Amino acid sequence: MSLSNRQKNYRYFVDQAEKAFFESKFLEAFLIQSCIIEGVLKDYASTKLAPFLDRSTTLKRKSKNFEFTRLLDELLLTGNINKDLYENLSKYKRKRNEIVHNILKHDDKKVLIKELKEAYQLGRHMKGFIVDEMLKSRKGKTLAELAAKQEAILSEVTSELPKAMAREFDPMFKKLNRDLKKLANK
């Protein structure tokens, strides 16, 4: 199997991030990883949200500048990622933003290094989503999409099940109660 240019670039940058991490260049590793995650998320969102964005030229134009949070929200609302992946990506984003926005405020470099390591480890957990998206065929569904679809179906089943059971069993229970009352009255 021949790798696409995109896959080669992904592999190259993951290797660079891992190399930097193992050489204790934690800021470099974290920054490379952040770029990878955001790049893959933007690419994934542009592919998956295209049917929704094509309905409005204004929205389509604005979508090129959607921030990470907006992309996550749109992907969740359209069923392209499930709630767990949404929460994991959101957790990573919060940690990343915490580091980026407070990087100049650190008095203790050991604390900064600890936070960079933690963020990097969170990013490693996103690898399943990233690899899944990188390697799937454009016409297939990703695990994230299938999980989101399954979650939506299960949610519908759990909300409808009590009503369906009541419709099915209500006549039987009414008859059983009538029969029990007849027995009790004898």
Image: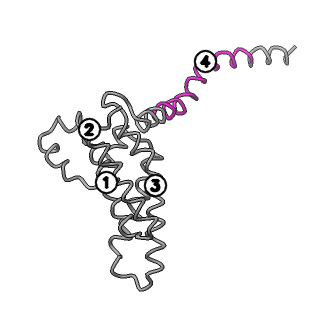
Question: What is the CA distance from the residue labelled 4 to the residue labelled 3?
Answer: 48 Å
> How many residues crowd mark 1 within 10 Å: few (<14), some (14–19), many (20+)?
some
- Which residue carries the number 3 mark? 124
The residue sitting at 44% across, 70% down in the picture is 24
- Which residue carries the number 4 mark? 168
Question: What is the CA distance from the residue labelled 4 to the residue labelled 2?
Answer: 43 Å
The residue sitting at 27% across, 44% down in the picture is 43
Q: Where is residue 100 drawn, in percent x and y?
A: 33, 70
The amino acid type of the residue labelled 1 equals: Glu
Image mark for residue 130: none
Foreground disc of the pair 4, 3: 3
What kind of element bears circle 2? Answer: helix
Q: Is residue 67 magenta?
A: no
The residue sitting at 47% across, 80% down in the picture is 110
Question: What is the CA distance from the residue labelled 3 to the residue labelled 2?
Answer: 23 Å
Question: What is the CA distance from the residue labelled 3 to the residue labelled 1?
Answer: 13 Å
Identify the image quadrant of the C terminus: top right
Query: How many tags in the picture?
Result: 4
Q: Earlier in the sequence, mark 2 or mark 1?
A: 1
Question: What is the CA distance from the residue labelled 2 to the residue labelled 1?
Answer: 14 Å
Q: Which residues are magenta?
A: 152-176
Q: Is residue 103 above or below residue 36?
A: below
The amino acid type of the residue labelled 4 equals: Glu
Q: Earlier in the sequence, mark 1 or mark 4?
A: 1
- Which residue carries the number 2 mark? 47
> How many residues crowd mark 4 within 10 Å: few (<14), some (14–19), many (20+)?
few
> How many residues crowd mark 3 within 10 Å: few (<14), some (14–19), many (20+)?
some
